[in-house]
Amino acid sequence: MTVIYDLEHITTYSYRNFVTFGQHRAIFLPSLGFVGRILSHSVETNIPTQVRWMMDTLSNNVALLEFSEPAKELIVTYRFRGEHFGMRAIADFPLDARAKEIPVQYTPDEWTDLAVFMRPHAEDPDGSLAAWTKSFVVGDQDDTLDLLQRMMDTIWHSLTYQAREVEGTQSPGETLRLQSGTCRDFAWLMIEALRRLGFACRFISGYLYDSALDGGDIGMTGAGATHAWLQVYLPGAGWRAYDPTNRITAGFDLIRVAVARHPGQVIPLLGSWFGNAEDYLGMDVKVNIRKLGILPEFEGEK
């Protein structure tokens, strides 16, 4: 089954007086691989802009925006239409024997390729992250998929989702202390915990499609906005998705845009402006995802 959808992502910056803008980096165009394809895409702004595309070190699609006029308001609109084939369940990808126990045994080539995704990035000054991580280790009975599921379930059950205006991502220790956070915070907590157990994990930025949106409702947490989750590399299965905010590991809900070692690498829109600090009035973001239709399965699809 294939879902066809339109997505519109509008970011508006407001200022008290005219300001000028430095280069902005926009990361919004999915790199879908075998789970979908892009049919069309565009970037529009309310002031004259030169757009140049590049691919970064992790093969993410990046639009570089150069603005030629000052303004009191900057509006950047991304639009794309895509086909989404969905993610199959982990059961459809049997693990290699070396991936079933903890720590996962990566080959020398895998170690070379995955090292940057295995090395912890966040500090743990009070040891709270290490202690939380160890609580999931049960000794000789450790099973990879069971541990991953238990950790994801624990985040979903014990932490409170709390949207906030402040940009950025909390440290894992702060998320544990507050017992709350956003989807980015939950994904980052699980990544840094798993890295300490020897798993290769990467941070994923993208969108969450929820069929409830088609009826004007919001069902899943984070739907109708940018979203974040993680992928874990499991030999035999490859990179597999885990969304601790919604307990999703498969299906049509997660639309991947970019991958990163840490959240700061995949901010959807990042740039500079020049003026007085008090000129900045705020930012508003609107994301609309609309399903256009469903294509029947082709022979061989599951």
Image (cartoon, helix red, strand yellow):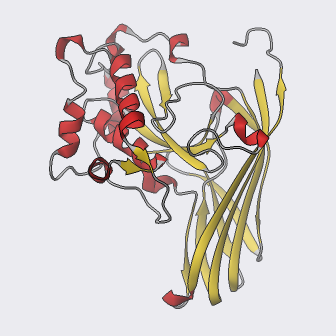
Residue at horizontal 40 percent and vertical 23 percent from the top: 149
Image quadrant in which you'd find residue 97: top left
Which quadrant is home to the C terminus? top right
User: How many badges with numbers are in the image?
Assistant: 0
Residue at horizontal 72 percent and vertical 13 percent from the top: 301
Taking 25 as reference, is 207 above or below it?
A: above
Residue at horizontal 46 percent and vertical 48 percent from the top: 184
Taking 54 as reference, is 190 above or below it?
A: above
Taking 176 as reference, is 200 above or below it?
A: above
- Given residues 108 and 291, the one toward you in this image is 291
- Given residues 76 and 24, the one toward you in this image is 76
Q: In this view, does 287 lie to the left or right of 166?
A: right
Residue at horizontal 42 percent and vertical 35 percent from the top: 156
Looking at the image, can residue 249 be seen? Answer: yes
Q: Position of residue 198 (x, y in %)?
A: 27, 29
Looking at the image, can residue 109 be seen? Answer: no
Image quadrant in which you'd find residue 272: bottom right
Q: Is residue 64 left or right of residue 164?
A: right
Residue at the extreme left: 126
Q: Position of residue 33 (x, y in %)?
A: 64, 32
Q: Is residue 1 left or right of residue 191?
A: right
Which quadrant is home to the N terminus? top right
Q: Position of residue 60 (x, y in %)?
A: 57, 47
Q: Position of residue 161 (x, y in %)?
A: 46, 47
